């Protein structure tokens, strides 16, 4: 999908279109006051104070019509420059614009405004020279948005839109948008009964339904086996810890705003854990280690709780209760490179198995000026960051660097992917940490009998099962490969009266062979049941009529295909078992 913000011409048009939107809103709602209207990857939005009014879906076409009218009228867009004082005078009745003016750079003496007909807005520009050039636009959606993103502030009305140079470009974009909406894991998750949410459980706390839970079990088994093969040992630890645990780790000082508040039980002060590292440090510390024992790899499918802003919470992709596919690898300094490489190969291996091709590696570094978020030890950071660069260059993987994205304890290599809707997110992560082993006073005994401090690599291949499943749903559009599909085979007798028994015995046989088969012998038309099996995206649909019953065969149809193939029951079981065992993906 095109990134409008990165396209100079479209960026200017979309910015201008945000002003056009504001002008139309002002015509329709006299009391409207405007906060900011930036260009984003998907077009533009404007945050507007409409007093007590909350927008409804019916309002957008009305606003759009007014925008068209203004555009046809064809006024020129004119830039003026004012002094700060003049600007304050001009916007004296507008607290939002006054706030913006007061936050402008001290050195910025001149402030620019843009006018079109009866509407003037504070803006750096640039803009197109006439509203006539803004013809092919669409208002996409509206939502509430707290002023300055702070839940203690007033809720403003946000309107999103997009503008193109031609009708064809706009149509193509809207079609892509529609396709993305169809792929949205929240939509498919509901249709296929994968997960649900309920306000009584809380925001960002999804419930995995049986179909979703089946997929998750398969993912857990898959990665558990890989990790066992690579020498990981798995543990179970509680999803709470005391405040003191997180004071020791540094989370209390550097990660508190992402944590749920403390709760007191008897004399102990607990927090729901946001990460599992402190628990795993204690597991390591439970006994003495020799340099020969390292690397020690402690894995866990571990539940964590994080405070995510209510506006950021999204389906399974960004949750407040998540399960990490986590592990902490305790290594000697001379093992960092090799172990890091093993993690990166595992990531690449897993992505290959799932057919994931569209991703970017991001080297996430600290922001040197942010002493609050990042532990203050420049030498330690420089060593860790350089070590990661060195390994990445050796591995010859393409990556980009991003400052301010590191964890508070160290730099990371993150894998970034693009969901159907919304900004990029991190899936896998691999992080280098010299800090926590020091804070927990971890040691191993070296070949001279001296105590040394190990280095820790934090890594999550799936990231969380939650986010990875969200991603997988969108990648596959809900048509999961057979090994993951909640129902692998739908068995449909042409008529339940005549082939019902046969269909039932075939279903049983498949189940005995460990295949997730379902019988649909409802008294519904064949066409209806076939369509439903297609909508549910079941990989194999068996259609059993008289002929099949007579010959003891089955006819199957693959999801998304029209033709049927007839083979013996045994052949079918062999074929599907092979596909499941190989974890084949069909693209
Ligand atoms: C890898 N301590 C490390 C761990 O050892 C850690 O917690 N790293 S993390 O903060 O980057 O989180 C690990 C992964 O969890 C991320 O890469 C991301 O894929 C996933 N994740 C983070 N926040 C959320 C969330 N709110 N919802 C779903 N998944 C999330
Ligand atoms: Zn960790």
Image: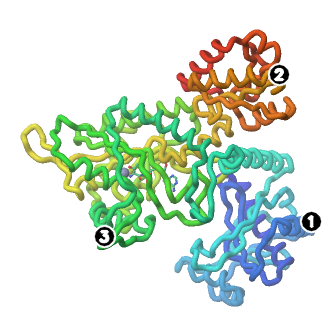
User: Sequence-wise, which precedes: disc 2 or disc 1?
Assistant: 1
Residue where numbered disc 2 is placed: 498
Say whether residue 307 is left or right of residue 38: left
Q: CA distance from mark 2 to mark 1?
A: 67 Å
Q: Is residue 316 above or below residue 511?
A: below
- CB of residue at label 3: within 8 Å of ligand 2? no
Question: Residue visible at 60% across and 44% down?
Answer: 210
Residue where numbered disc 3 is placed: 268
Q: Position of residue 315 (x, y in %)?
A: 61, 54
Say whether residue 450 is left or right of residue 180: left
**Label 3's element?**
strand
Question: Residue visible at 23% across and 38% down?
Answer: 294
Between marks 2 and 3 in the image, the one whose residue lies nearer the viewer: 2
Question: Residue visible at 73% across and 80% down?
Answer: 33
User: Sequence-wise, which precedes: disc 2 or disc 3?
Assistant: 3
Residue where numbered disc 1 is placed: 72
């Amino acid at each position: 999908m095109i990134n409008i913000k990165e396209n100079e011409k479209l960026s200017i048009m979309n910015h201008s279109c945000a002003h056009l939107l504001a002008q139309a809103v002002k015509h329709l709602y006299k009391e409207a006051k405007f906060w900011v209207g930036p260009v984003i990857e998907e077009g533009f939005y404007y945050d507007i104070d409409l007093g007590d009014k909350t927008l409804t879906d019916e309002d957008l076409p009305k606003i759009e019509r007014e925008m068209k009218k203004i555009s046809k009228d064809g006024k020129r867009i004119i830039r003026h420059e004012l002094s700060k004082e003049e600007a304050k005078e001009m916007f004296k009745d507008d607290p939002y614009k006054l706030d913006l003016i007061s936050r402008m750079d001290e050195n910025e003496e001149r402030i620019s405004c843009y006018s079109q007909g009866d509407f003037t807005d504070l803006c750096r520009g640039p803009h197109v020279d006439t509203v006539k050039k803004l013809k092919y636009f669409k208002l996409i959606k509206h939502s509430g948005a707290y002023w300055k993103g702070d839940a203690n502030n007033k809720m403003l009305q946000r309107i999103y839109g997009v503008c193109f140079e031609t009708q064809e470009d706009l149509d193509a974009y809207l079609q892509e948008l529609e396709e993305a909406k169809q792929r949205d894991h929240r939509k498919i998750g509901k249709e296929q009964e994968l997960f649900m949410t309920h306000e009584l459980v809380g925001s960002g706390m999804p419930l995995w339904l049986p179909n979703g839970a089946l997929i998750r079990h398969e993912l857990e088994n898959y990665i558990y086996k890989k990790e066992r093969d690579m020498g990981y040992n798995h543990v179970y630890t509680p999803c709470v810890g005391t405040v003191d645990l997180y004071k020791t780790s540094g989370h209390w000082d550097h990660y508190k705003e992402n944590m749920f508040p403390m709760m007191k039980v008897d004399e102990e002060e607990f927090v729901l854990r946001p990460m599992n590292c402190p628990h795993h440090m204690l597991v390591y510390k439970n006994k003495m280690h020799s340099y020969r024992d390292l690397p020690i790899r402690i894995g866990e499918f571990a539940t964590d709780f994080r405070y995510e802003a209510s506006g950021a919470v999204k389906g399974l992709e960004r949750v407040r209760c998540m399960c990490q596919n986590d592990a902490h690898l305790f290594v000697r300094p001379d093992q960092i490179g090799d172990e890091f490489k093993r993690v990166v190969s595992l990531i690449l291996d897993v992505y290959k198995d799932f057919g994931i091709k569209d991703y970017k590696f991001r080297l996430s570094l600290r922001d040197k000026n942010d002493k609050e978020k990042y532990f203050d030890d420049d030498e330690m950071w420089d060593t860790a960051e350089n070590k990661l660069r060195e390994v990445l260059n050796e591995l010859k993987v393409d990556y980009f660097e991003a400052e301010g994205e590191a964890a508070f304890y160290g730099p990371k290599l993150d894998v970034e992917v693009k969901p159907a809707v919304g900004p990029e997110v991190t899936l896998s992560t691999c992080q280098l940490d010299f800090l926590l082993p020091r804070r927990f006073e971890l040691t191993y005994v070296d070949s001279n009998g001296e105590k040394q401090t190990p280095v820790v690599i934090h890594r999550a291949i799936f990231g969380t099962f939650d986010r990875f499943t969200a991603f997988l749903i969108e990648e596959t559009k809900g048509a999961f490969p057979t090994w993951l599909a909640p129902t692998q085979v739908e068995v449909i007798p042409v008529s339940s009266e005549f082939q019902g028994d046969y269909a039932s015995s075939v279903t049983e046989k498949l189940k005995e062979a460990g295949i997730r088969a379902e019988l649909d012998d409802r008294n519904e038309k064949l066409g209806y049941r076939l369509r439903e099996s297609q909508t549910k995206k079941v990989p194999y649909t068996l259609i059993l009529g008289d002929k099949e019953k007579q010959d003891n065969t089955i006819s199957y149809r693959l999801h998304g295909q029209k033709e049927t193939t007839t083979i013996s029951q045994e052949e079918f079981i062999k074929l599907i078992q092979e596909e499941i065992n190989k974890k084949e993906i069909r693209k």
